[in-house]
Amino acid sequence: MKRNRNFSLLLFVVFLGILFITFSVISVEARKYRVKKSKPHKHQNDRNGNGNRNSPGPAPAPLPHYPTRSTIFDVMSFGAKGDGVSDDSKAIIAAWKAACKVSGATIEIPSNFQFFLKPITLQGPCMPNLVLQIDGTLLAPPNVGSWPKSSLFQWINFKWVQNFTIKGTGIVDGQGYSWWKYSSIYFLQKNSKHIPDMKPTALRFYSSYDVTVRDIKITNSPQCHLKFDSSRGIKVDNITISSPESSPNTDGIHLQNTQDVEIHNSNFGCGDDCVSIQTGCSNVHIHHINCGPGHGISIGGLGKDKTVACVSNIIVEDISIQNSLTGVRIKTWQGGIGSVKNVSFLNVQVSDVKIPIMIDQFYCDKKFCKNQTGAVGIRGVKYDRIIGTYSVQPIHLVCSNEIPCTDVDLIDIQLKPSPGYRGFHQALCWNTYGKSQAPLLPSSIDYCLGKNGDPVKRIEKSHEHVC
Ligand SMILES: *[C@@H]1O[C@H](CO)[C@@H](O)[C@H](O)[C@H]1NC(C)=O
Ligand SMILES: *[C@@H]1O[C@H](CO)[C@@H](O)[C@H](O)[C@H]1NC(C)=O
Ligand SMILES: *[C@@H]1O[C@H](CO)[C@@H](O)[C@H](O)[C@H]1NC(C)=O
Ligand SMILES: *[C@@H]1O[C@H](CO)[C@@H](O)[C@H](O)[C@H]1NC(C)=O
């Protein structure tokens, strides 16, 4: 009997033990739950701007689900005001820094707010699949005087980012009006000492990889709207870039030293090139875009001040260009070295373009440039199905005196004068070699190209091997 009683006592002790452990676990869980669920509530209150943090009030009702760790970083939760006047730069940088540490995070710039930002740098490397969701409006400093003198290169600088996406229905507004008027001749004469030499680009990517920019609108940049510099693996899809036709030097997209690029389904209308391709670019595919007004699609100017320029493997296809100075253009300065090779312009619709097809190896941005020997060599440029209307000259292919352009092919070119214009120039080819294939309109295109150049001499002179 004694053994039996001892056994009952043991059972009772074990039972008490289990009871104690269970209770402890439950209370710890309950504490955890309270801590976690309170966070998203604070978040929401902050975002709506009516969080009454000082009133004690009743405890919030429990959430139906156990909340998981949030990957949305709303700039409002980081102190952004969104009133278009307060400086929200710090809030955006803080949201970026927090999101950067989390895989698959989204930084949210909410709609119906305007965020005034000074020049900022958003720096990586970050965890993969970071998204900047721009649904509201970003505003740059509106006056030249309010730009910090040390940050004239760009407004928003993305540096060392990888596997990163910008998207959203929002607007990036460079508010460039005060910069544009600084370029007028009147201003140059009256106030030349106040003009900064450099004008900011709106969005710039530097040394970045696997970047997508989609859906957003970029407008009124002081100078270039979207620049990729020393980057690789770039996709631009469904964006709109616009600034007034009279705004000087406002390129749409500027590519420099950047490879593996696709730009498509987008609309460009600004004061300069829709897309400008500079030295160090290769494997660039531009298609299904609408361009104009402005200066069309340009490769160059290359080789300024006897510099090296290398551009290769460019395809521009299925695009339309209207109301522009030039259509598809390659421009190089006299005296440069290097090469432009393997470029195709396919299925380009032009409408009221002054000069639809242009190679200019005497490019000069002022009244007079000194003659130089040598040039960036141009080889392997195909124009196939360039159709529409021009208002000054259908074709202007002017290559360097020492280094002819070779393998320049003109296939199915049908260019008619724009209605209402008079006094057109004939197709012009200078030191340009290649083949042409009907249909060709105007018929002067047929005997424009030379039939053979001297490729060996050409390559030696252009120092093409530097590329
Ligand atoms: C990031 O990497 C993932 C996984 O490899 C890929 O699916 C996604 O397209 C990448 N995003 C960008 C912007 O390159
Ligand atoms: C293109 O972007 C706009 C927002 O600017 C969006 O409403 C639309 O759905 C996008 N289209 C596609 C095909 O993604
Ligand atoms: C020319 O460029 C295209 C597009 O980038 C590429 O697919 C092709 O291989 C290149 N051709 C040569 C001969 O390099
Ligand atoms: C430069 O070269 C062009 C063409 O060879 C010639 O017509 C022009 O007079 C030259 N200009 C100068 C300043 O030497």
Image (spheres, rainbow, N blue to C red):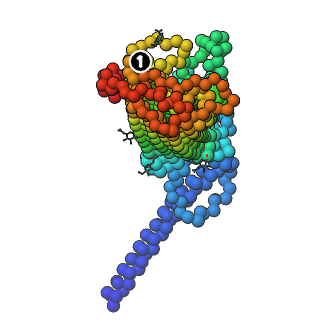
Give residue 309's position: percent from left, percent from top.
40, 26
**Mark 1: few/some/many CA within 10 Å (<14, 14-19, 20+):** some
Say if 305 sits above or below 447 in the image: above
Q: Position of residue 153 (x, y in %)?
A: 52, 26
Quadrant assignment for the N terminus: bottom left
What's the residue at 52%, 35% (across, down)? 440
In this picture, residue 106 sits left or right of residue 175: left
Indicate which quadrant contains ligand 3: top left
Image location (x, y in percent) of residue 454: 33, 24
Q: Is residue 284 visible?
A: yes
The amino acid at mark 1 is Asn
Give the position of the C terminus as an image quadrant.
top left
Percent position of residue 169, x then y: 61, 46
Query: How many marks are shown on the rendered structure?
Result: 1
Residue at the image position 62 percent from the left and 19 percent from the top = 183
Residue 406 location, quadrant = top left
Would you name the residue on which mark 1 appears? Answer: 401
Q: Residue drawn 63% across and 59% down? A: 60
Residue 210 left/right relative to 442: left
**Which residue reaches farthest bottom?**
1
In the image, 354 versus 162, the foreground residue is 354
Q: Is residue 227 left or right of residue 110?
A: left
Dot 1 falls on a residue whose secondary structure is: loop
Q: Quadrant of residue 419?
A: top right
Q: Nearer the viewer, residue 22 or 250?
A: 250
Q: Residue at x 46, y 37 (%)?
A: 437
Task: State yes or no: Cβ of the residue under disc 1 lies below 8 Å from any atom of ligand 4.
Answer: yes
Q: Is residue 286 visible?
A: no
